[in-house]
């Protein structure tokens, strides 16, 4: 039987919020079966908490932000991507600010934390997946995203930036996670930004914690980071990382193929809302035997992490 997963022990980290610039204490703790992924603002008097869900992503300016009753937890996508990469179903996420720390701009530091905490199976409950039964898409101008039936998990993304650094880099990538390691091929890809965006971010009270320590920074011609890129196509791979995290706000792994052109946080969430609004487009599934699970989800068994 395929069981739900949580952490073996709590783990703690300190970082800075990318947009707020605030110091953030982050604690990840084990949670009971069917608890889901729950975020809790322990800096607020009533310590409000909410389980992650598609309808709670109510701010998608440069990140995915959960908003409920005026309480915010922002920039969740990299942490959610790490949860998805290791198949974490149940966890309590305590934060002391309105934003998850940005760390190095990728999911790799979160993977390290999860691996240090340990991942364990919860033998009291089956793991549930969301299987896509028919194509669903969202379109906005020349941007589009689509989920299609596929017995596994596959992501195909194309970005389009008219910039010299991007013209030297592949702007399309297709990854089938039955053959691709999330840890090796996706998790280390960092977020990126342009110097000319700084004015916009300042006017919108965003990007206060950004630096070349936690993002790829580009001027009009080149990458400014001393070490260059971690992957030749790091830009589009980071968009894959983001998409995996954005889609995991479902709270369940997707058995589907995801494709996108110039997609972003807003489009990814719009697609999930389209999916969930059509009961004929999806179903919950569980598996009694490991051999029945699509290969995309067999790679990261707790004993191998």
Image (cartoon, grey):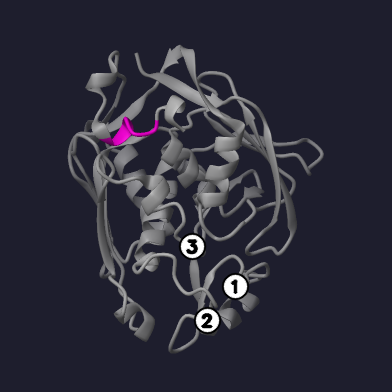
Q: Position of residue 81 (x, y in %)?
A: 46, 46
* The stretch drawn in magenta includes residue 261: no
Note whether residue 243 is visible.
no
**Which class describes the residues within 10 Å of circle 2: few (<14), some (14-19), or many (20+)?**
some
Q: Secondary structure at mark 2?
A: loop
Q: In the image, is 40 to the left or to the right of 135?
A: right
Residue indicated by mark 3: 190
Q: In the image, is 279 to the left or to the right of 65?
A: left
Q: Residue at x 37, y 24 (%)?
A: 128
Contact check, label 1 and label 3, Cβ < 8 Å:
no
Q: Nearer the viewer, residue 73 or 114?
A: 114
Q: Nearer the viewer, residue 288 or 233?
A: 233
Between discs 1 and 3, the one toward the N terminus: 3
Query: In the rendered picture of this protein, how many numbered marks are placed on residues?
Result: 3
Q: In the image, is 87 to the left or to the right of 256?
A: right
What label does residue 241 carry, if any?
Answer: none
Q: Residue at x 41, y 60 (%)?
A: 238
Q: Nearer the viewer, residue 193 or 297?
A: 297
Question: Which segment is the magenta one?
Answer: 296-300
Q: CA distance from mark 1 to mark 3?
A: 10 Å
């Amino acid at each position: 039987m395929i069981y739900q997963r949580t952490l073996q022990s709590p783990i703690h980290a300190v970082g800075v919020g990318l947009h707020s610039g605030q110091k953030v204490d982050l604690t990840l703790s084990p949670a009971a079966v069917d608890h889901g992924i729950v975020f809790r603002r322990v800096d607020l008097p009533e310590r409000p908490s909410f389980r992650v869900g598609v309808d709670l992503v109510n701010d998608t300016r440069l990140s995915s932000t959960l908003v409920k009753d005026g309480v915010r937890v922002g920039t969740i996508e990299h942490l959610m991507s790490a949860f998805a990469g290791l198949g974490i179903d149940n966890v309590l996420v305590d934060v002391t600010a309105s934003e998850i720390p940005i760390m190095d701009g990728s999911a790799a530091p979160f993977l390290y934390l999860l691996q240090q905490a340990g991942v364990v199976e919860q033998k009291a409950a089956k793991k549930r997946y969301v299987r896509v039964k028919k194509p669903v898409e969202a379109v906005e101008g020349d941007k589009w995203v689509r989920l299609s039936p596929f017995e596994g998990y596959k992501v195909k993304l194309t970005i389009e930036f008219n910039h010299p650094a991007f013209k030297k880099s592949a702007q399309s990538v297709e990854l089938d996670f039955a053959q691709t390691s999330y840890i090796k091929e996706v998790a280390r890809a960092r977020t990126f930004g342009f110097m000319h965006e700084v004015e916009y971010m300042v006017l919108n009270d965003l990007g206060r914690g950004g630096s070349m320590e936690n993002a790829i920074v580009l001027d009009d011609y080149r990458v400014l980071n001393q070490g260059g890129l971690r992957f030749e196509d790091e830009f589009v791979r980071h968009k894959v990382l983001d998409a995996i995290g954005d889609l995991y706000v479902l709270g369940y792994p997707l058995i589907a193929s995801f494709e996108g052109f110039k997609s972003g946080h807003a489009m990814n969430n719009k697609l999930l809302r389209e999916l969930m609004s059509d009961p004929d487009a999806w179903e919950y599934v569980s598996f009694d035997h490991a051999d029945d699970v699509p290969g995309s989800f067999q790679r990261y068994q707790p004993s191998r992490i």
